[in-house]
Image: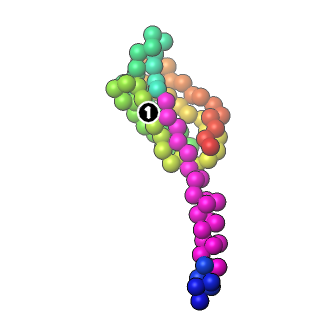
Amino acid sequence: MVNKIILHLIPFAMSVVLFGGTDGQLRGKVMNVEGEPLIGAQIFIEELGLGAVADIDGNYILLNIPVGTYDVTVAMISYATQVHNNIVII
């Protein structure tokens, strides 16, 4: 009986290992040309509808991003919007 239960749990355990880490993250710091942090800058991946806002030190983190290649946009009032193409999330 115990052997049958173990045999049924092995495929389940393997699926957890194979599909457990399918999301990535993107983190960084937004600064101007003088090296000052841009508080409140918006960082987003438009095609996924995911975004974050830079904190007081200019740091941001985007979590639960599906693995793939994306265009990441950084925007802030009175600064030119920048699009960084082909950012790979692994």
Taking 54 as reference, is 15 left or right?
A: right
Tell me if residue 19 comes above or below residue 49 in the rendering. Answer: below
Q: Which residues are magenta?
A: 7-28
Q: Quadrant of the N terminus?
A: bottom right
Taking 78 as reference, is 20 left or right?
A: right
In the rendered image, residue 82, in percent from the top left (x then y), is placed at 54, 24
Foreground pick, 31 / 71: 31
Residue at x-position 34% and y-position 26% = 56
Foreground pick, 36 / 8: 8
16 in magenta:
yes
In the rendered image, residue 66, in percent from the top left (x then y), is placed at 58, 49
Residue at x-position 63% and y-position 73% = 10
Tell me if residue 16 comes above or below residue 50 in the rendering. Answer: below
Instruction: Report which residue position mark 1 lands on.
Output: 60
Residue 77 showing in the rendered view: no
Which image quadrant is residue 20 in? bottom right
Q: Amino acid at mark 1?
A: Tyr
